[in-house]
Amino acid sequence: MAPIPRPTPSTLRAVHEALAASGDEWESVGVPAGDIGVECDRAIWLSFRRASAPEVITWQKRRIFERGNIEEERLLDLLRMVGVTVWGEQDRVRAAGGHLRGKIDGRALGLLEAPSKEHIVECKSAKQEVFRKVAKEGVKKGKPEHYATFQFYMHGLGIDRVYYMMSNKNDEGLHFERVPYDAEFAMRQVARIERIINMPEPPSRLCSKRDDFRGMFCRQAEVCWGEVRARVHCRSCLHSTPLMDGNAGWDCSRWQKPLGLSEQDEGCPAHLYIPSMLVGYEQIDCSEEEETITYRSPTGDIYVDGATQEDAA
């Protein structure tokens, strides 16, 4: 007989419910700086196109994010404690027409290693396994995704040093590291993101099979492999194009107009999928007059994409 689970204390249950009630969904306006180090171009493209359902911020995730913010401030306070001047928390960095975007943890002046040199400060915390790897090998080898992110920050702000601070979640150990700007690396990364943003169709997969360990935790996996259809909105529509000037703008060729963020999420009845987003679907018909494309799904079902011009209007 299976043991009867212990009941959750009423106060704890009430806290869970209150936190859950304050939860929401999160999506970046463009490509977040933290995704620069993502290995798979296709995952970045699908995320940028908002193909999958937005991430739900549960009470547990909210607590994790809050802990990260608290630890960030604790690390900055350590610098202040030894006389370092810290400012510029959450200063914005933009590139690729505003589609590539992020915020720094801070700027610092007066570090003992280089008192007159301004540094960008990057604060992280990690479990012991990750911390030990970074402490032993340095951030470039130990946590390359962090390295890619702050190289972009240096590139965008014209500052050629980062002070990287990591704390150990297990035992409060600390690792501090000064890292120089690598112009060639940073420019390659920004150029890569620009190339991905400008792709009219999704690039090829990094993973060669569905159970590839590299894609086990990818939020785009179900859409990537055609297990579910991408969401219907402007960013999955063949009529929309990201603009490379201004601040993360989009344009609709169907209606000859720019698209605001709320409009992009809402979409319109004239939506037509970018064909290659319908993985495994076979086009069997189309109607220019009705603005529809008819597909046969991998299971044999018929799917009619689009709507008449009158309905769309």
Image: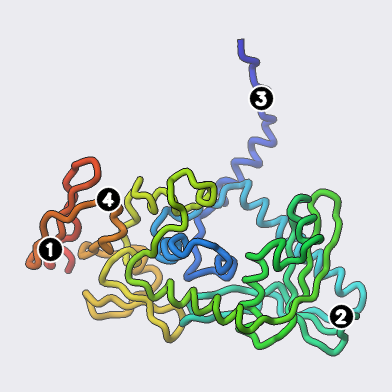
- Asked whether 250 or 147 is in front, the reply is 147
Residue position for label 4: 280
Q: CA distance from mark 4 to mark 3?
A: 47 Å
**Image quarter for residue 123?**
bottom right
Of pointers 1 and 3, the one earlier in the residue sequence:
3
Q: How many marks?
A: 4
- Is 105 situated left or right of 76 in this image? left
Residue position for label 1: 308
Q: Secondary structure at mark 3?
A: loop
- Is 193 situated left or right of 279 in this image? right
Per the rendering, the mark at residue 7 is: 3
Residue position for label 2: 111
Looking at the rendered structure, the kind of residue marked 2 is Leu
Task: Tell me whether the residue at label 4 lies in contact with that at label 1, contact meaning CB atoms closer than 8 angstroms.
Answer: no
Of pointers 4 and 1, the one earlier in the residue sequence:
4
Image point (60%, 79%), residue name: 186
Q: CA distance from mark 3 to mark 2?
A: 52 Å
Image point (28%, 80%), residue name: 257
Which quadrant is home to the N terminus? top right
Q: Secondary structure at mark 2?
A: loop
Looking at the rendered structure, the kind of residue marked 3 is Pro
Q: CA distance from mark 1 to mark 3?
A: 55 Å
Of badges 4 and 3, the one in the foreground is: 4
Looking at the rendered structure, the kind of residue marked 4 is Gly
Task: Tell me whether the residue at label 1 lies in contact with that at label 2, contact meaning CB atoms closer than 8 angstroms.
Answer: no
